Image (tube, rainbow, N blue to C red):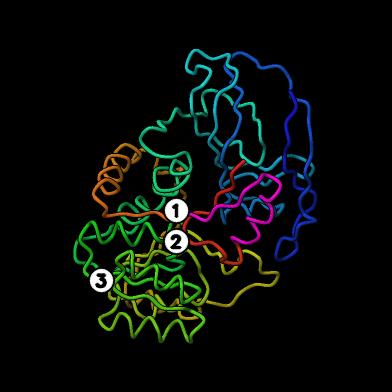
Amino acid sequence: MQATEIHLASRPKGEPVPDNFRTVTTELPALEDGQILVRNTVMSVDPYMRGRMNDVKSYVPPFQLDAPLDGGAVGEVVETRSDAFAVGDAVSHGKGWRDVAIVDASSAKKIDLDKAKASAYLGALGLTGLTAYAGLTAVAQFKEGDTVFVSGAAGAVGSLVGQIAKALGAGRVIGSAGSPEKVRRLQELGFDAAFDYHDGSVKEQLAQSAPDGIDVYFDNVGGDHLEAAIASANTYARFALCGAISQYNATEPTPAPRNLALAIGKELTLKGFIVGSYRQLSGEFAEKMATWLADGSVQWDETVVDGLENAPKAFIGLLRGENTGKMVVTI
């Protein structure tokens, strides 16, 4: 069987461009024992993928040149050599950026499309949702009554963080976003305050939105947002460092935060995290998220791009902030 795949043609220098990607048709080998063949229906593009396009050592190996990219995807099993899966099963797995994938059965998970549509398992019910929940509760050690600031709050993770914080009893939730439309959406989702970081100093806007300071910061942006959060942090505030999208395309070192010394006197906790280290929370998260989605406490947004050939365009748009909620590509 043939598969259409998106390969990394060259490593981006700064912002990725279409020429960094190549669409390739390949002949797939026969399945081996313990493998399944999946026809993908929807895939995810995520900010962390930008780091994997650089040839540097990190927590996950870099993408290889002239080889398919990968990432979260959902599809239907069309052939199986595993007792764990039958033809017709819907599964989530990590072999996105292609229309057909050979997947080790041990790395696939059966999902129920009667409970939620396929893309939900890439967003609110998937690793995106677990990232938001684990970062807030386990990493930032959220407590009822906390004032929470979320940067990049209209994105897939950030929008869920704010809503989960409200569901768990936050005293005040503040979000930053990149357009007036996104700010309005955050207000619709229950954020107590939201601001457009293009409207002026992030530090000043955050100080106005959180006059009594912040207790928790969930960082998706880094740079001036992290600097602002340090300035507004109360004593013993806890920071969950999830991402730094403001720096992913940088070709020179970025200076902020320039006030890190304040973390000493304020006795702040700044902790970076990778969601894979918190998979033990999956059951707890799934149970709570199902309840929140059912009672309307949590809503999830997505931006949909149609066609595998448009996956590079979707990814580039994601890094430019063209999405509200989760960016997914239908195949």
Tell me which residue sits at (49%, 12%) in the image. 83
Q: Which mark is residue 241?
A: 2
Residue 113 position (above or below residue 148): above
> Rounded to the nearest whole Å, what is the CA distance between mark 3 and mark 2?
20 Å
Query: In which quarter of the view is residue 167 placed?
Result: bottom left
Name the side, left or right, on which 153 lies relative to 329. Answer: left
Front-most of residues 78 and 289: 78
Q: Amino acid at mark 2?
A: Leu
Percent across and percent down for residue 319 are 60, 63
**Mark 1 residue crowding within 10 angstroms, few (<14) / some (14–19) / many (20+):** some
Tell me which residue sits at (57%, 56%) in the image. 47
> Rounded to the nearest whole Å, what is the CA distance between mark 2 and mark 1?
6 Å
Tell me which residue sits at (55%, 32%) in the image. 75
Q: Is residue 192 highlighted in magenta?
A: no
- Compare marks 2 and 1 and give the one earlier in the sequence: 2
Looking at the figure, which quarter contains the C terminus? top right
Which residue position holds label 3?
Answer: 172
Percent across and percent down for residue 72 are 55, 41
**From the viewer's perspective, is the residue at label 3 or at label 2 nearer?**
3
Residue 12 position (above or below residue 63): below
Q: Amino acid at mark 1?
A: Phe
Residue 188 position (above or below residue 281): below
Disc 3 secondary structure class: strand
- Which residues fall within the magenta stretch? 302-318
**Mark 2 residue crowding within 10 angstroms, few (<14) / some (14–19) / many (20+):** many
Disc 2 secondary structure class: strand
Disc 1 secondary structure class: loop
Q: Is residue 317 highlighted in magenta?
A: yes
**Mark 3 residue crowding within 10 angstroms, few (<14) / some (14–19) / many (20+):** many
Q: Which mark is residue 273?
A: 1
